[in-house]
Amino acid sequence: MSRKALIAANWKMYKTPAEAKAFVDAFLPLVAGHTRDEIALFPSPVLLPTVIAAAKGSNVSVGCQNIHFAEEGAYTGETSIGQLKAVGGTHTLIGHSERRQYFAETDEIVNKKLHTALKHGIGPVVCIGEVLAEREAGLTADVLKTQIAGAFAGITPEAAGPIVIAYEPVWAIGTGKTATPEMAADAHRIIRAEVAKLLGADVAVAIRILYGGSVKPDNATSLIGQEEIDGALVGGASLKPDSFTAIVKY
Ligand code: PGA
């Protein structure tokens, strides 16, 4: 089964509206007509209207880096799924390691956010991955299984279609250290087997598993070229149109 790759840009807390618009204006002509892969941009919430307007009618989707699980309420500083939809966003990252590390997001919170995204037709990219100490202790498989079981609690095979998983070993994020293509593919096989156990073989075969963690133009081909790797979630190298284009066109 061939899965269409998704190449996604996680801009984190970078760019002003003017910089974001300049990126999209430069980027769209570079990827015009590129249909082999899906392309998505994940800017900060304050940039969403600008980026969505600039990308309108193109082959580039736009989503949030984080949403709250509640539909609305007294949650100072948060963004709701209704707000994301109202400005035309179609996707959201969930459980990025920086959210887990700095904002205490647990598997339980990730699970609630996943239910909210699916209920409202927003495409979720669920991020999982081990920290260095866990890898060194030989715990990678256990950590990934626990994160998947936690994230997917109560999700039915029928509802799982839109879910994308991003495997991002935390020790590879922003460090310039990448998992080797073999290490990443091994982790992806563990993840796919666990999805099969929880949601059945059909969901497991179809679900896209992205790799993230220091993906750059010069390693994109060897990583995304792996049968098991269905695209990339790119941080640092997604901030410039040229380098992100080189990854999109790996
Ligand atoms: P990086 O970030 O490409 O800068 O390592 C990836 C991510 O955090 O999604």
Image (cartoon, rainbow, N blue to C red):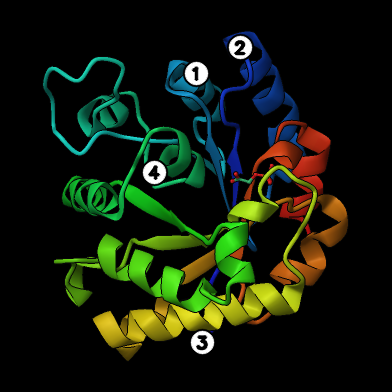
- Dot 4 crowding, Cα within 10 Å, few <14, some 14–19, many 20+: many
State the separation of the CA atoms marked 3 and 1. 36 Å
**Image point 49% across, 24% down: which residue?**
44
Look at mark 2 in the image and give the residue it sits on.
16
- Could one spot residue 113 in this view of the protein? yes
Look at mark 3 in the image and give the residue it sits on.
1
Relative image position of residue 39 (x, y in whole percent) = 58, 49
Amino acid type, residue under disc 3 in the picture? Met
- Dot 3 crowding, Cα within 10 Å, few <14, some 14–19, many 20+: few
Look at mark 4 in the image and give the residue it sits on.
91
- Asked if residue 204 lies left or right of residue 210, the reply is left
Amino acid type, residue under disc 2 in the picture? Thr
Q: Quadrant of residue 228?
A: bottom right
**Image point 58% across, 12% down: which residue?**
17
Q: Earlier in the sequence, mark 3 or mark 1?
A: 3
Q: Are marks 4 and 2 in contact (CB under 8 Å)?
A: no
Q: Quick check: is the Cβ at mark 2 less than 8 Å away from ligand 1?
A: no
Q: Are marks 2 and 1 in contact (CB under 8 Å)?
A: yes
Q: Quadrant of residue 136?
A: bottom right
Look at mark 1 in the image and give the residue it sits on.
47
Q: Earlier in the sequence, mark 4 or mark 2?
A: 2
State the separation of the CA atoms marked 3 and 4. 24 Å
- Asked if residue 233 lies left or right of residue 194, the reply is right
Relative image position of residue 142 (x, y in whole percent) = 43, 76
Find numbered disc 4 in the image and state the secondary structure of the residue it sits on.
strand
State the separation of the CA atoms marked 4 and 2. 21 Å
Question: Closest to the observer: 237 or 21?
Answer: 237
Which one is closest to the eye, mark 3 or mark 2?
2
Work out whether 170 lies above or below 58.
below
